[in-house]
Amino acid sequence: MTNVNRIKVVVLGSPRVGKSAVTVRYLTKRYIGEYSSTSDLLYRHNVTFDSVTTEVEILDTSKCAKNGCLYEHLRWGEAFVIVYSVVDKHSFHEAQEVLGQLVKLKLPSYYTCLLLGNKRDLDHSRQICVDEGQELSLQYGCQFYEVSAAENFAGVSLAFQSLLREARSVQLLKALPIRRKLGVNSVSKVLGNIFGKNTKGDRKKRPSLSI
Ligand SMILES: Nc1nc2c(ncn2[C@@H]2O[C@H](COP(=O)(O)OP(=O)(O)OP(=O)(O)O)[C@@H](O)[C@H]2O)c(=O)[nH]1
C-alpha cells in the first residue's frame, strides 16, 4: 500500500558520474570531492511542500548496481534520479539502459523519474550536448536537468525538489480511494496537474533546466 508520508528515491548511474556528489550536495549544500563508500547509502530527511511534510528516503547506490542489484533498486524505489556525466558518453548510454529497464518494470503504474546530467562545469570536455539529454528525457517522459554538483547548489536543489513535488502528487493520486469513481474529465484534470497537460490537451514542457 502507498505510504503518502514517505517517498523512496533511488539515485542510479554509471560509476564516478557524481551520484554521491549530487546526493550530498542536495542534502547538505556542500560539495565533497571524494567519497570512499563502496556500498549503498540510505539517507533520510523531511521536505515540506504546501505545508505538508513528507519523509524522504534517498538511496545512493554504489557499483553493486552493476552486479545485479539494479532490479531490486528499481523495485524498491518510487522516484528515480538517473545520473550521467556530460563528459562521459558511456554513462549516457548506461542511463538510457536504466531508463529502459525502469519502464519495463514499472509501467503501467506511475513512477517519477529525473534524468540528471552532471559535471556541466567541464563544458570544454563535453561529450553529450544538452539537446541529447533533453531528447532522451522526452522519450521516457522524465524530468531533465543539467547541473554541476561541484559548482552549484541551486541547480541540484531545484532538480531534486522538482522530482519530489511530482513524486508527492503521484502518491496522492495513487492513494485516491478506489471506490470513489471519477469521471473522465476529473481523471484527465488530475493527470494534467501532475504531468503538465492542460485540459485542452496542449502538452506543457516538462521541467528542464541547465544551472
Ligand atoms: N568536475 C566535476 N567533478 C565532479 C562533479 N561531481 C562529482 N565530481 C567528481 O567525480 C568523481 C566521482 O564522484 P562521486 O560522487 O564519487 O561519483 P559516484 O557516481 O557516486 O561514484 P561511485 O559511487 O564510485 O560510482 C569525484 O572525483 C568527484 O569529485 C561535478 O559536478 N564536476
Image (spheres, rainbow, N blue to C red):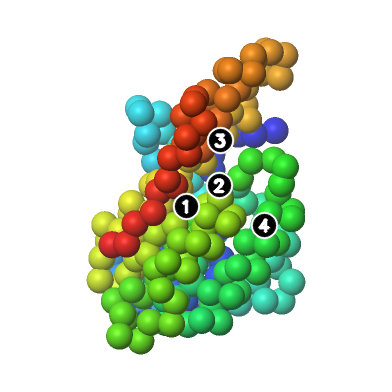
Split into quadrants, the picture shows ligand 1 in the one at bottom left
Residue at screen point 32% across, 70% down: 148
- In 3D space, how far apart are the residues under numbered discs 2 and 1 (Cα atoms)? 8 Å
- In 3D space, how far apart are the residues under numbered discs 3 and 1 (Cα atoms)? 14 Å
Count the marks.
Answer: 4
Residue on which the image places disc 2? 112
CB atoms of marks 3 and 4 within 8 Å: no
CB atoms of marks 2 and 3 within 8 Å: yes
Residue on which the image places disc 1? 143
- In 3D space, how far apart are the residues under numbered discs 4 and 2 (Cα atoms)? 10 Å
Q: In the picture provided, is 139 more to the left or to the right than 156? A: right
Question: Label 4: few (<14), some or many (≥20) within 10 Å?
Answer: many
Q: Secondary structure at mark 4?
A: helix
Q: Is mark 2 within 8 Å of ligand 1?
A: no
Query: Where, quadrant-wise, is the N terminus in this rendering?
Result: top right
Question: x, y (%) of residue 164?
Answer: 45, 44
Q: What type is the residue that disc 2 sits on?
A: Thr
Q: Secondary structure at mark 1?
A: strand
Residue on which the image places disc 3? 170
